[in-house]
Image (tube, rainbow, N blue to C red):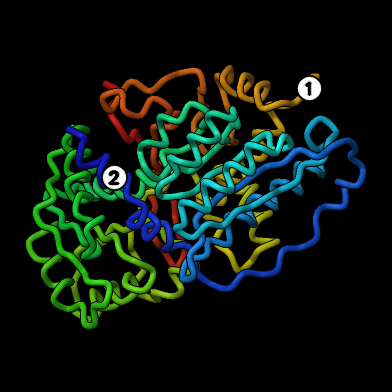
Amino acid sequence: MFQAIRRAAGIAVVFTVILGLTACGKSAPPPAANTAAANLSGAPYTYHLIYTSLTNSPFPEMPHGAQLAVDEVNGTGGINGHPLQLKTCPVNLDLNKAASCARQAAADKSVIAANVFMGQPEAVLDIFGKAGIPVISDYPIPLAQFSCQVCFPTSAGAFTSVAGEGLLAATQLKAQRVSFVALDVPSSRGLASAVSQVLQATGHSTQVVKTVTVPLTAGDLSAQVTAASQDVDAMLVTLTADLLPRFMRTVQQLGIRVPVVTVPVDRKQIAQIGPPAEGMYHAGGYSHDSAGFKQFESAFSARYPDDPPSDVAYSIWLGAHLFQRVSKGQPAVTRQSVLAALGKLTSVDTGGAAPPLDFTRRFAGFGGKMPRLFNNTIVFYQVKNGAVSQLSGFQQLIPTR
C-alpha cells in the first residue's frame, strides 16, 4: 500500500526542494566560540555534521544550529568536563564526498556523535552504523532513515511536510476535494499518490482529485493556478523558493479564495511572498509554542538574525544537547556507551517541542517499515498577520494499527 510513498520519499531532489523553502537570505558571520570552553580540559569530543548544501539553498541554519549547541554545551560543562568541538561536511548532492566524510569521521576516534541531513543518506548511515556512531536527533528525509539502527530521530522529518499537507486540509479545513501542485520533475510524480494513501490510511474521505505540475522554467502561472483551484476545497502546493511566491501572487491577482496548504515557511519566506502569504497553512514536526523550541529560537535568532530557526536547525541543535545529556555520569564516553545509553531512554524531554520520546520502542504502524519512528506527530500552522501561528497541538501522523 505504501510503495508510492517509499519511492517518493527516497528521492533526494524533491525533498531538498521542499526543505529549501526556508533556506534563503545571507548569513551573519559566526561569532567566536563560548569562552566557557576554556575551563574544560582533556581531549575534545567531536560532533560531526554531514549535510546537503546547494548554491541556491546553502542551508546555513544547519551548521549554525550545531555551532550554537556546541557552544552552549561547552558553557555548561562540556561532555563530562571535556570540550566538545564541531566538524561539518557540506556535500551539495555529491554522494561520493558524503561517503568520504563519513569514512573520515569513522576513522576519527574523537567523533562520538553525528547528525545527517541528506536526501540519499544510506551510504553515510551504513558507514556510521558499522562504526557504531550514534546519529542523534536527525531530521529524516527518505523513509529508509527510519530503519537506521544507530539513528535516534526526534521527528518524522520531511515526511511531515508532504503528508501533513493532506492531513491539515482534511482535519483543519474539512476539505473533501483537493488538488496537488508540484514541480514537473520525475521525482515529484509519486507525491500526490503518497498523500492520497496517507489520507486513506488515516480514515479520511478527502481525495486528491487532480495533480497540477509546474515546470521549473515556468513564466506566467495563471494556467496552473486556475487549473489547481477549480472545483476543489483546498490546494496542496509543493514548490521551490522561487516558484512559491509567484504562485501565491498569481492566486491573489486572480482573486482566488481557495485555501492554500504548503510546506513550512518562515518569516523571511513570508516577507518574500508579501501579502499573498496571509492565510497560508502548513504542517511542521515540532511545537514552536513550546518552551523547548522557544529556548532554541531565542538563542538562535539572537546570534544568527539572518537565518531561519527552522525545524531542521532545531533537530541538529537538539542532537548536541542530547549527546551531552546522555553522557553525564559515564566513566568513559565512547560511541558504544552513548549508543547504549540512548537505547535505554524511555522519556526524552524536549521541553514540549515533541511529546516525551521513547527510544526503546519500535514503531509497529505503517506496515513495520518505519521501526525507528519515535515521534508519530505533526503540528499545524497558519500565517496570520505576517507571522506563523500555531493552530494545533500534536496530531497523530500515521495510524498505529
Q: Residues within 10 Å of mark 2 (few under 14, many from 20)?
A: many
Q: Which mark is residue 163?
A: 2
Q: Secondary structure at mark 2?
A: helix
Residue 337 drawn at (x, y percent): 68, 21
Mark number displayed over residue 177: none
The answer to whether residue 37 of the structure is visible from this angle is: yes
Would residue 383 appear left or right of 252 to someone viewing this image? right
Image quadrant where residue 203 sits: top left
Up/down of 386 relative to 163, above or below: below
Mark 2 belongs to which amino acid?
Ala
In which quadrant is the N terminus drawn? top left
Q: Eyeballing the image, is 211 above or below 377?
A: below
Q: Nearer the viewer, residue 276 or 227?
A: 227
The circle drawn on residue 332 is 1
- Alpha-carbon neighbours of circle 1 within 10 Å: few (<14), some, or many (≥20)? few
Up the image or down, 390 lies above or below 292; here it is: below
Residue 286 in sight in this render: no
